């Protein structure tokens, strides 16, 4: 049996469906993003009680730069507002915040808020919150492949762990390997959209039609319960058939 790490499971969420949720209500897509930011606060607060030790949220993909500049601009402002307004609560609740992804294309004001939020929350031990902004799993894998010393890969027994460390490092994960236990995608699509491809090698996948603005703590708890009912085999045979 694979036990949860003492810090709890790693859940990653593709927060999808903001635009469709708003459009269905006759509102602008931007209203969906504003509502989506409120959902983030609720889910972060509920995560520790669900046994989650690490929560990685997909907020903005490298391909999302292709959206209309007004939408991109609003999203960047919302991220900044979220970071600035949530820092104090994160410190109180022991949430360590980290932003993963590229940083060289992020607006300067947002970058300052990122650095400040990471610095202010670095002592948090209850929840490791990672928010993916300008993130592409394939780009991260390429950058790790370019950065790694081939000597680190020469021992097959440790090559994967060494690569995972560099992968986390190139994306500002500060060298910690974070395999995903449960990947949730809201909004009804059933695809990964270039999110954590390496880290999800054995993740349990959970897709829900619920749009991100209407996803709540009860939905999160249901997803984790479903995860706990699954048998993870990691390539071996079912427990009952062993021995
Ligand atoms: C997810 O919602 C948020 C981001 C990608 C930033 P979408 O904006 O993709 O919403 P839909 O998928 O168009 O409904
Ligand atoms: C994935 O959603 C990225 C985020 C949720 C941040 P998209 O809405 O951009 O993905 P596709 O285009 O439907 O694959
Ligand atoms: Mg979408």
Image: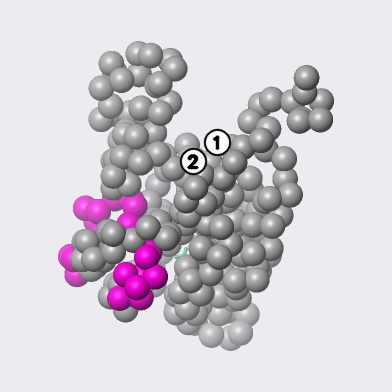
Residue 123 spot, x, y in % from top left:
28, 59
Q: How many marks?
A: 2
From the viewer's perspective, is residue 34 above or below residue 45? below
Between residue 72 and residue 13, name the one nearer to us: 13
Element on which disc 1 rests: loop
Give the mark nearest the N terminus, 1 or 2: 2
Using the image as rendered, state which of residue 39 and residue 157 is in the foreground. 157
Quadrant position of residue 210: bottom right
Lateral position of residue 176 relative to residue 50, left or right: left
Quadrant in which the C terminus appears: top right
- Res. 141 visible in picture: no
Q: Residue furthest right?
A: 241
**Residue range (magenta):** 88-112
Colour setup of the view: one colour
> Which element is circle 2 on?
loop
Residue 77 locus on image (x, y percent): 31, 75
Circle 2 residues within 10 Å: few <14, some 14–19, many ≥20: some
Q: Residue furthest front?
A: 6
What residue is drawn where x is 66% and y is 59%? 223
Judge whether residue 199 can be spotted in this image: yes
Residue 80 falls inside the magenta stretch:
no
What residue is at 32 percent from the left and 70 percent from the top?
A: 91
Please give left or right for residue 200 compared with residue 152 in the image. right
Point out the image quarter for the N terminus. top right
**Can you tell which mark lies on residue 201?**
1
Residue at 43% x, 26% y: name it. Answer: 160
Task: Please give the residue where the numbered disc 2 appears in the rendered image.
Answer: 179
In front: 15, or 119? 119
Q: Residue 8: image x %, image y %?
A: 52, 51
Q: Residue at x 40, y 21 (%)?
A: 158
In front here: 140 or 125?
125
Query: Do the residues bearing badges 1 and 2 touch, measured as CB atoms within 8 Å?
Result: yes
């Amino acid at each position: 049996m694979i036990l949860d790490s003492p810090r709890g499971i790693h859940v990653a969420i593709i927060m999808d469906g903001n635009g469709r949720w708003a459009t269905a209500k006759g509102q602008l897509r931007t209203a969906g993003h504003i509502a989506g930011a409120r959902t983030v606060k609720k889910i972060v607060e509920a995560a520790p009680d669900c046994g989650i030790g690490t929560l990685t949220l997909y907020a903005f993909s490298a391909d999302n730069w292709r959206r209309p500049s007004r939408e991109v601009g609003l999203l960047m402002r919302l991220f900044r507002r979220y970071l600035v307004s949530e820092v104090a609560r994160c410190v109180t609740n022991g949430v360590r915040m980290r932003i993963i992804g590229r940083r060289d294309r992020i607006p300067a004001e947002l970058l300052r808020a990122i650095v400040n939020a990471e610095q202010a929350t670095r002592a948090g031990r209850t929840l490791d919150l990672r928010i993916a902004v300008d993130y592409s799993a394939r780009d991260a894998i390429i950058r790790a492949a370019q950065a790694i010393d081939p000597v680190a890969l020469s021992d097959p027994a440790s090559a994967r762990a060494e690569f995972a460390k560099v992968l986390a490092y190139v994306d500002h994960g500060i060298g910690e390997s974070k395999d995903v236990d449960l990947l949730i995608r809201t909004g009804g699509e059933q695809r990964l959209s270039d999110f954590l491809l390496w880290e999800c090698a054995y993740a349990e996948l959970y897709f829900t039609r619920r749009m991100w603005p209407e996803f709540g703590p009860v939905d999160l708890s249901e997803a984790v319960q479903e995860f706990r009912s699954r048998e993870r085999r990691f390539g071996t045979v079912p427990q009952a058939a062993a021995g």
